[in-house]
Image (cartoon, helix red, strand yellow):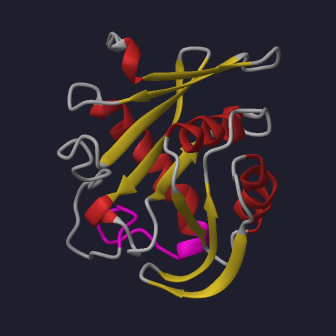
Amino acid sequence: MKVPEYAQPDILRYSLPMQPSEIELRLTTEADAYIVGNLWPAYVHDIAQYSGTKPNAHGVLSSDPDCREWPGPGDWWSKPGVLFPYLVLADRQPAGFLLISSGPYLPSQDIDFCVHEFFVAHGFRGKGAAARAIRLAIASHPGAWEVVTYPSAADPIRFWRKTLPTCASAGITETQGEHPWGTKVIWRFQSGVPLQ
């Protein structure tokens, strides 16, 4: 299977002399949505340790007992300019995805952007790939942001606490409590700083 070519305006690139040496975010289209779909089961499996989701009778990690196949990430490709389904590439290889929502797809009305889903495969973790991908995305979408995670997610909480101060142009607030997506740790901040 050939990896699709992408148009230059949809590529955000961050290069550093480390492994992986280059991180890119590519805005995906319906033509290459299958790559995000292929990574989706690994993401769902990863977050199941925090969400408590278990396989149903059909072997699918889902709270829906009738679900027979991986449902995938949904219809992220139907609203360009409002939903931003990015593929994370490390040295031009798929390494994960980042789904950013805005407009009517936000969980709260007093923000401009939200990290809806974020996943970097295990082979790319601990090497700066995730932090560089987040910095690229946030710098490319200035405004009021919200990021949430599960209160039991110790590694993601450490990641966000370390990474978000390098992205915010103003102070970051961190709270824990009820959110439209359940009980979460919630970070809010204003973006607009250049990449460091």
Query: What residue is rendered at 66% in x and 84% in y?
Result: 176
In this view, the residue in front, 37 or 4, is 4
Q: Is residue 58 magenta?
A: yes
In this view, the residue in front, 174 or 123, is 174
Identify the image quadrant of residue 160.
Answer: bottom right
Query: Is 42 on the left-hand or right-hand side of 190?
Result: left
Looking at the image, the residue that sits furthest to the bottom is 178
Query: What residue is rendered at 27% in x and 75% in y?
Result: 64
On screen, residue 122 above or below 47: above
Q: Is residue 154 magenta?
A: no
> Which percent across, then down, holds residue 99?
42, 48
> Which percent across, then down, holds residue 76?
27, 47
Q: Main secondary structure of the magenta part?
A: loop
Query: Is 51 on the left-hand or right-hand side of 122?
Result: left
Identify the image quadrant of residue 175.
Answer: bottom right
> Which percent across, then down, holds residue 111?
46, 67
Image quadrant occupied by the N terminus: top left
> Which percent across, then down, holds residue 80?
24, 40
Q: Which residues are magenta?
A: 49-62
Query: Is 38 on the left-hand or right-hand side of 93?
Result: left
